[in-house]
């Protein structure tokens, strides 16, 4: 991965440090899945308990994103970026040497809390240190990390699992130490004016709301949706989360330095970016079902089926920096329109033309990856960076991360419900991708309402 995107040497070095940090966090998502069977066997837990290895990480990530992002706006980017790396390394250490399952979950909570701040703080750093005409390329380079992680993660996991599942977490520790040293040497120190009192009430309400929504949505029984919803606790918990978000809206209007600046939603550009983030999260959720569909459609084994994601991942890695360069020339509206067209076409082809046709199955995956890369990496973060005040850059990036993550959670629940409603057979999977194609087309319609190049560049 080249870091010479037309910036000076200092800018390229800053981007390299940010890239490594985001890659470390992204790898943790793709590298843990292969370790679950070994963790399950080691601690002798059932599958229902095992899933909390992911759930606690997700919930703490959702809480960490706005909290750490806000801290970086108040206390300086470098300090909080390093703090996030320290937390991630500490969580990895606790997880790696956990002697029981509860200690492992504690390590995962700390990991998630640190990881939640890495991407939004890195995005805010780009806004602070990279010239406006180069930000698209920088965001694109950082955005390619997630595709790269999906390639490296399973391979690295396969090698490390030959020794022990613990090595999947031990490997983070030296990387974190090196990254801390590089951050101290390369990242510039930022000093902001003395801020208003911290918004503890807003942060508390947001944390409880996010926890309730994430827990409630993850508790829905996909295999028996009606039974899952009849379990009274699930709709009550989700309702509590939604009510708290409404309360948060009114609370944040009264605070001098809120966790979430609700007035930003009055900007059509900002509001559309948040809706598009939910949409791209829904589309991302669809990726996890592709290998299962390949197993049903082509009678592949589990290992072979996982390789059907390779075209999607490769085009994501290629597309993210490419769209980033185009973004600097043509603006976010142009990029999102083109990317949403690719996403719609790819999902449409997968839905209607890939049955019994492996070549079309792989081609549609490649087109989907290209579409995802054009929206997920650079343009949405570019929009939010332009719309948010400088003092709230990281906080607004954190909000974007939350919306994308919730899109993934909601998408997994919705797609699982669609698949289950049709007996978990092949038709259910194709119906779910038809639904996602409609979502992608709606994203295309919404992208037409974004600011044009001249208006957007004027406000950078």
Image: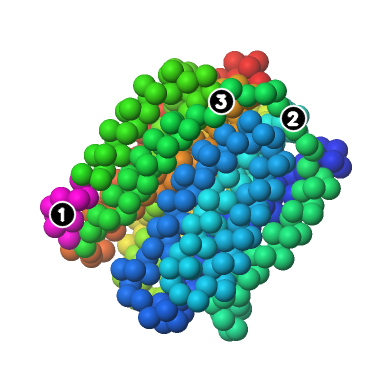
On the image, numbered disc 2 is attached to which residue?
191
On the image, numbered disc 3 is attached to which residue?
197
Task: Answer yes or no: is residue 304 visible.
Answer: no
Confirm or deny contact between disc 2 and disc 3 (CB under 8 A): no
Which badge, 1 or 2, is on the more N-terminal residue? 2
Confirm or deny contact between disc 1 and disc 2 (CB under 8 A): no
On the image, numbered disc 1 is attached to which residue?
231
Q: Nearer the viewer, residue 277 or 5?
A: 277
Q: Nearer the viewer, residue 21 or 317?
A: 21
**Mark 1 vs mark 2: in front:** 2
> What secondary structure is found at the residue carrying circle 3?
loop
Which badge, 2 or 3, is on the more N-terminal residue? 2
Instruction: Decide: is 436 above or below 312.
Output: above
Q: Position of residue 154 (x, y in %)?
A: 55, 70
Q: Residue at x 28, y 49 (%)?
A: 216
Q: Residue at x 47, y 20 (%)?
A: 255
- Magenta stretch contains residue 234: yes
Q: Position of residue 206 (x, y in %)?
A: 41, 36
Horizontal side of 454 relative to 292 (left or right) equals right
- Magenta stretch contains residue 94: no
Q: Position of residue 382 (x, y in %)?
A: 60, 31
Which badge, 1 or 3, is on the more N-terminal residue? 3
């Amino acid at each position: 991965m080249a870091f010479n995107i037309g910036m000076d040497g200092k800018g390229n070095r800053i981007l390299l440090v940010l890239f490594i940090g985001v890659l470390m966090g992204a790898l943790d998502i793709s590298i843990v899945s292969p370790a679950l069977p070994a963790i399950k066997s080691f601690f002798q837990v059932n599958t229902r308990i095992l899933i909390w290895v992911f759930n606690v990480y997700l919930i703490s990530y959702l809480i960490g994103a706005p909290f750490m992002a806000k801290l970086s706006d108040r206390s300086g980017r470098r300090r909080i970026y390093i703090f996030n790396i320290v937390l991630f390394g500490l969580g990895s250490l606790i997880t790696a040497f956990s002697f029981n399952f509860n200690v492992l979950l504690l390590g995962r909570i700390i990991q998630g809390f640190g990881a939640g701040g890495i991407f939004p703080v890195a995005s805010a750093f780009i806004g602070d240190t990279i010239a406006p005409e180069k930000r698209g390329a920088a965001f694109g380079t950082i955005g390619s990390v997630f595709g790269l992680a999906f390639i490296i993660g399973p391979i690295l996991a396969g090698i490390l699992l030959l020794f022990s599942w613990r090595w999947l977490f031990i490997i983070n520790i030296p990387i974190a130490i090196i990254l801390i040293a590089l951050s101290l040497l390369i990242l510039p120190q930022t000093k902001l004016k003395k801020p208003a009192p911290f918004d503890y009430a807003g942060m508390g309400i947001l944390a409880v709301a996010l926890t309730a929504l994430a827990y409630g949505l993850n508790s829905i029984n996909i295999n028996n949706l009606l039974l899952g919803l009849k379990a009274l606790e699930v709709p009550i918990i989700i309702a509590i989360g939604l009510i708290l978000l409404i309360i948060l809206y009114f609370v944040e209007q009264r605070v001098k330095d809120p966790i979430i600046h609700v007035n930003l939603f009055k900007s059509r550009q900002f509001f559309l970016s948040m809706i598009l983030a939910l949409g791209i999260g829904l589309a991302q959720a669809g990726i996890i079902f592709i290998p299962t569909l390949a197993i049903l459609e082509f009678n592949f084994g589990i290992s072979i089926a996982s390789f059907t994601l390779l075209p999607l991942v490769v085009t994501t890695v290629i597309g993210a920096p490419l769209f980033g360069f185009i973004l600097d020339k043509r603006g976010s509206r142009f990029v999102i329109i083109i990317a949403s067209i690719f996403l719609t076409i790819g999902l449409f082809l997968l839905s209607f033309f890939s049955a019994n046709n492996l070549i079309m199955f792989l081609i549609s995956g490649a087109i989907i990856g290209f579409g995802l890369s054009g929206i997920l990496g650079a343009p949405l973060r570019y929009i939010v960076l332009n719309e948010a005040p400088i003092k709230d850059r990281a906080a607004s990036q954190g909000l974007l991360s939350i919306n994308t993550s919730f899109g993934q959670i909601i998408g997994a629940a919705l797609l699982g419900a669609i698949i289950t409603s049709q007996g978990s057979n092949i038709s259910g999977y194709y119906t779910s991708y038809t639904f996602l194609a409609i979502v992608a087309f709606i994203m295309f319609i919404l992208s037409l309402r974004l600011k044009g190049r001249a208006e957007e560049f004027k406000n950078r």
